[in-house]
Amino acid sequence: MSEHKVYPVPESVAARAHVTQAEYEAMYRRSVDDPEGFWAEQADRFLDWFEKWDTTLDWSFEGDVHVEWFKGGKLNVAHNCIDRHLAEHAEKTALIWEGDEPDQDQHITFRELHEQVSRLGNVLKERGVSKGDRVCLYMPMIPEAVYAMLACARIGAVHSVVFGGFSPEALKDRIQDAEASVVITADEGVRGGRKVGLKANTDKAVDQCPSVHTVLTVRRTGGDIGWNDSRDVWYHEAVEAASADCPAEPMDAEDPLFILYTSGSTGKPKGVLHTTGGYLLYAAITTWYTFDLQPDDVYWCTADVGWITGHSYLVYGPLANATTSVVFEGVPSYPDASRFWEVVDKHQVSVFYTAPTAIRALMREGDEPVTKTDRSSLRILGTVGEPINPEAWEWYYHVVGKEQCPIVDTWWQTETGGHLITPLPGATELKPGSATRPFFGIVPALMDTDGHVVEGEGEGALVITRPWPGQMRTIYGNHQRFVETYFSAFKGCYFSGDGARRDGNGDYWITGRMDDVLNVSGHRMGTAEIESALVLHDAVAEAAVVGYPHDVKGQGIYAYVILVKDAEPSDALRKELVNLVRSEIGPIASPDAIQWAPGLPKTRSGKIMRRILRKIAANELDSLGDTSTLADPAVVDELINNRVTG
Ligand code: PRX
């Protein structure tokens, strides 16, 4: 079975890598034996500080839960990602923008990046934005998205990037929660030849957001948009008029850098808050070691800036290391299934980082779209966002990488800021489907259902027992929810929500979420959010949403819907429900299957037994488990008989 395959580190990779296996072991040991000494050294090595910190670490994962790194230290993220590189790298390309159409691209040097970010920083200041104020970004994948993140960091404003695929309703919720005063957007985004009305969506959202006084709009397509003189400003006009002199604001290491909303098992998405010093250090060091960065790398992470991967591994990590980072506006299938590999050849990409869902979708198109390209510039391949099945891993390794490129399967989360469990190219034997070993300073453990630590080989809930610099500090505006969500399941530990297995060699295999969070095409979604959207419809009495295995998306969305007494099921109603979810959350949350259900399997105390719903959706009818505790066991047969295929 491919699960047992092991790919040793090629000698050629180990010879040149930042760390070999022995060096990894020694450095890991040091990082957990003397975490403060280790991280203080790395903070000096990877970052430029205006003032040294007073305390390296102050933390507790119990009681008054808090984590503070490098408190009292002063630095600026934009200074670290741009200014300090100017002496040696002013003319080096910082960003390569590859547009949706293959004939559109642009190279932006660190000098140009510095000018654009400084001008925009001044625009924000002129519009009254100061340190600590929130700025919402609802942008396509264009260089201005990166300028905007760095401009906020430069002046000490806190950015909240909202993925451009979210609906006006979802955007509104996020703007309101963060009380943002400015939104930066574009007239329209372009993806796969199709336009997305970002400004129109912003207008709808902002009409319900009294905190917003300014909307800055980048002209991307020149399409028709609405205009409100009292709040709308053209990005290019404002930036042209602004000064290019904008000093980088000295920030405390623990000052907030950004908020990023992510889904949990209950309630509305939560604003994950990351701070300045620890986050940047962790993004920088993980990018350096995981991708074994070399000075002339052209590094391409295909994630959107609307997700944490876009934050840590498209913007902050690579730029902190003065690495050239590719910003891709389009999709892997446009104009055809060779696009990724043609871009690799065109820009001579050496490090390529994408999601298993994209690999699986491309694998279905066969080898030819890949093999007709050259790809000899590639050195390292990476994956992120969901478990990668061994078949997709092998295809990525043999066909895309021509057996020349180690694959780093990086396990982490929005909350963790950066990679927690990942191979390092020169140090780790690869096993298809395993995220392998913890990164420096990361102490994982597996817990059984009684809350006891599982030693050696075994399976359990994946927790982290010690703090690390890149971890989230709180949920914006709701510290209590932070404590309850992450630190209450297992005393004194950060609970990731994932399960994992550890094999006899100490390698970790992530088994997936243990809670009601779905991972659809690498997009994280709460079942509760989708259920809340469905029950907004007058015809719906109750809804239960679960995930089920899906060949390309990893997980598909399966909704059980109970209608009110007089409502009739119909295809038209099914469409209305899908549209409702699209308008409440966005197209990424559209259910793949909707089953009209007479009732739900509930315990006598009224709790929905989701385990049973998951099994029915997955068509695993032999392993339904015990149904005797149900209030009405007959409902299970009815659900099985009317099961729909997604
Ligand atoms: O279930 C894990 C899965 O994605 C979740 C985190 O999602 P999000 O916060 O959106 O961040 C995605 C980018 C890091 C995790 O709880 N996940 C992420 N990476 C992997 C993974 N599952 C298995 N293997 C991975 N490499």
Image (cartoon, grey):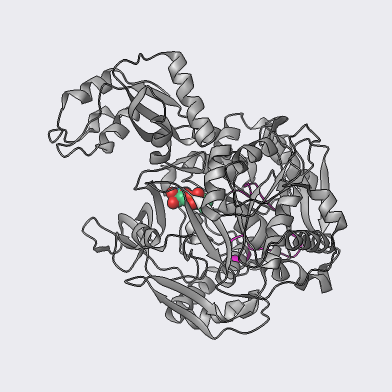
* Residue sitting at x 80%, y 44%: 346
Residue 66 image-quadrant placement: bottom left
Question: Residue extending furthest front?
Answer: 230
The rendered magenta stretch, by its main secondary structure, is classed as loop
- Foreground residue, 633 or 420? 633
Residue 456 is situated, as x and y percent measured from the top left of the image, at 30, 63
Residue 593 on image: x %, y %: 42, 25
Instruction: Using the image as rendered, state which of residue 539 and residue 147 is in the foreground.
Output: 539
Q: In the image shown, does 131 or 80 lie closer to the viewer? A: 131
- Above or below residue 265? Residue 361 is above
Q: Is residue 394 visible?
A: no
Residue 513 location (% of width, % of height): 38, 47
Q: Quadrant of the N terminus?
A: top left
Q: How many marks?
A: 0
| Residue 581 inside the magenta-drawn segment | no
The residue range painted magenta reads: 288-306
In the image, residue 248 sits, relative to residue 293, either above or below, namely below
Q: Quadrant of the C terminus?
A: top left
Report the front residue among 194 and 133.
Answer: 133
Position of residue 498 in the picture relative to residue 450 (left or right): right
Taking the image as drawn, is residue 53 in sight?
A: yes
Q: Percent from the top left, x then y, of residue 223?
A: 78, 32
- Point 46% across, 48% down: residue: 269
The verdict on residue 300 being magenta is: yes
Report the residue at 59% width, 51% height from top: 382
Relative to 324, residue 516 above or below: above
